[in-house]
Image (cartoon, rainbow, N blue to C red):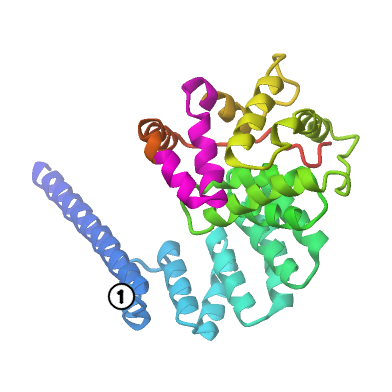
Amino acid sequence: MNKLRSGFCLLILLFSGTLVLAQEDVKTLQTSARQYMQQGDYSNATLVLNKALGLSPGNMELQNDLLFNYYLARDYGRAMELGKQLTERNDADIRSYQLLGMTYRAIEEIKEAERLYKTGIKAFPGSGVLYNEYGELLWAKKKFPEAVEQWESGIKADPNYSGNYYNASKHYFLSTDKTWALIYGEIFVNLESYSRRTPEIKQLLLDAYKKYYTNINSLQAPDQKNGFEMAFTQLLSKNAATVSEGITTTSLTKLRTRFILEWFEKEPVKFPFRLFEYHRQLLKEGYFDAYNQWLFGSAQNLPEFQQWTSNHQQNYDGFIQFQRGRVFKLPADQYYRFPR
């Protein structure tokens, strides 16, 4: 009996050890395949991913990598075939829908893409990425109101996914809206602070403040039923004198300092908002000037920004360290664009 039990335990140990080795091999192969993909060597990536799938058949993560590899290689036929298989599985995930949607858009299968996004959003109603990409599809079809509706739905459902803020801020900047290019643009650069898209939205923010104060009478009035919009625009208008001699990083810092002090003058505030709480935190820490330099300085005048950071290096370095040591995260209950 003891020999039988010992033999059984040995079999379990051998099986467990083999399983661990297989898992390690799969991870090693996946890493190697992703490196090939980064190098643009899609043929070798395909070989390695298929070898990994031989060790772990049905592995969704590996199959999604293979789907992405086909997409990058512009092998849209195989990408579409695999993507359909994955999205029809009971354990289909968001990435499968995203990658198949990208494939449909690449070959301009617009109806299929639209049908896919609707199905994906129904299956994953909290997925910001699917709302964002569906909005991009609609925007490309020049269905602008429908596109921004998807981005707004994405912001509401998944407030910490940056893509919807990126697209929505650009839409509102091009419109006559007074409020949401400023709000969404700044949220975006705090969620995605150091990407290739960040400088673009920093410039948009600077231009949006200029647009606000130079075209204030021709822009759309805030929604009288939207208390947040009313409170936001009233304080910007009240402190307009701070930027009367020009929209600069210095004048915007002064404007926004007064704005935050008045926003929190009475507590609890009527409209709790993480972005403004962050501003107040930066003021208390002594980093609000540096933050506004980071936000507007390089967009306004790069040599002046560089000079400022050189003259205030300790403060600026302190802000950067403070910023990178924290995750900017928005709660789900602070959506004010279309309040109920």
Give yes or no for residue 305 being in the magenta stretch: yes
Residue 223 x %, y %: 88, 39
Coordinates of residue 76 in the picture (x, y in percent) = 54, 83
Residue at (86, 40) in percent of width and height = 222
Where does the N terminus fall, quadrant-wise? top left
Comparing 111 with 257, the one in front is 257
Q: What stretch of residues is rendered in magenta? A: 282-309
Quarter holding residue 15? bottom left
Secondary structure that dominates the magenta span: helix
- Res. 133 in view: yes
The residue at which mark 1 appears reads as 48
77 on left or right of 157: left
User: In which quarter of the view is residue 237 placed?
Assistant: top right
Horizontal side, residue 306 vs residue 208: left or right: left
User: Does the stretch in magenta take in 319?
Assistant: no
- The secondary element bearing badge 1 is classed as helix
Which residue is at a point 68% across and 65% down the rendered structure image?
136
Relative to the observer, which residue lies in front, 273 or 258? 258
Answer left or right for 261 relative to 216. left
Closest to the observer, 54 or 286: 286
Q: Is residue 227 above or below residue 34?
A: above
Few, some or many residues within 10 Å of mark 1 (<14, 14–19, 20+): many
Q: Amino acid at mark 1?
A: Val
Q: Quadrant of the C terminus?
A: top right
Where is residue 91 drawn, in percent x and y?
Answer: 54, 59
Q: Nearer the viewer, residue 73 or 258?
A: 258
